[in-house]
Image: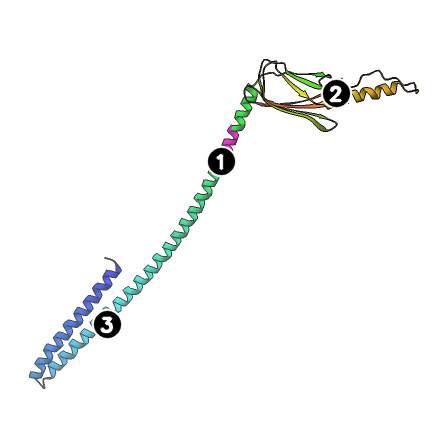
Amino acid sequence: MNLTSDIYLLSFVTAAGTSCGILLIWKISRRARRMQGSQPLSTIIAIIGAVTGILGFVTATIAIVQTRKANKLSQDANTLAEKANGIAEKSIGIASKANGLATEANKISSDANTISKRALSVTADQTIYDWGFKFDKQTSTINMTNNSPNTAHDVTVVVRNDDKTIIESRVKEIAPFGDLPLQNQLLSDKVSEDQRNIDRINASDDGLMVIAVGKITVDINLVWTSDLGLKRSEKFKKSFS
């Protein structure tokens, strides 16, 4: 039985005791009126009244004490509940941080697996590509040839001269031993201009002689994907005349 039930029971007992005391006093009072002047009867009535009052006082005191205890226990319970809520909130925060760390760890693991797969691809991809370049002055075209039995995919070629891009070409693939023409009239114009400069020096009266032919020097930047899906790149410096 809890404290609240005890308080209800004590209150009930107090009320019952008080009621019985009042009823007893009433009955005795009736007899007293019949037996007026009887001193012992008055004394008995006084004693009963005093006992009833003491009983009510004691019961009320016990009820007050028990009520205070119940309030104290209720306050303690509320305090414990607040602490429990605080601990629960901290636990939720810790769990959230743990989930974040787990997510980050999974991402790191995924990145590590990706890097590992790429490393394996690099190791496994032993395909060899050999690139050749020939210049046709009449058409002002550089013919780039895939001199290998492997297809080059997603090919990008950038040709630069004097730090300027003069040709840029992108094709989906170049078949084994296939060609990619890279044409720009500037190529032949540069070769012709260089040749004129050489002829001018050789025709001068200063006695200088240049034994050379006109040419153009270019940087060729090449990027492609191998048959096994590995991205590759090379850079070539070529002179054409």
Query: Who comes first in sequence, dot 3 or dot 1?
Result: 3
Q: Residues within 10 Å of mark 3 (few under 14, many from 20)?
A: few
Q: Which mark, residue 105?
A: 1
Left or right, 231 with reference to 207 = left
Q: Amino acid at mark 3?
A: Phe
Query: Who comes first in sequence, dot 2 or dot 3?
Result: 3
- Residue 32 lies, with reference to residue 141, above or below; the image says below
Q: How is the image coloured?
A: rainbow
Left or right, 188 with reference to 35 = right
Quarter assignment of residue 68: bottom left
Asked if residue 107 lies in the magenta stretch, the reply is yes
- Dot 2 and dot 1 residues touching (CB under 8 Å): no
Quarter assignment of residue 49: bottom left
Q: Residue at x 8, y 80 (%)?
A: 31
The one nearer the camera, 77 or 208, is 208
Mark 2 vs mark 1: give the one in front: 2
Q: Amino acid at mark 1?
A: Ala
Q: Which mark, residue 57?
A: 3
Highlighted range, magenta: 106-113
Real-space Cα distance between discs 2 and 3? 125 Å
Real-space Cα distance between discs 3 and 1? 71 Å
Q: Amino acid at mark 2?
A: Ser
Is label 1 in a helix, a strand or a loop? helix
Residue position for label 2? 188
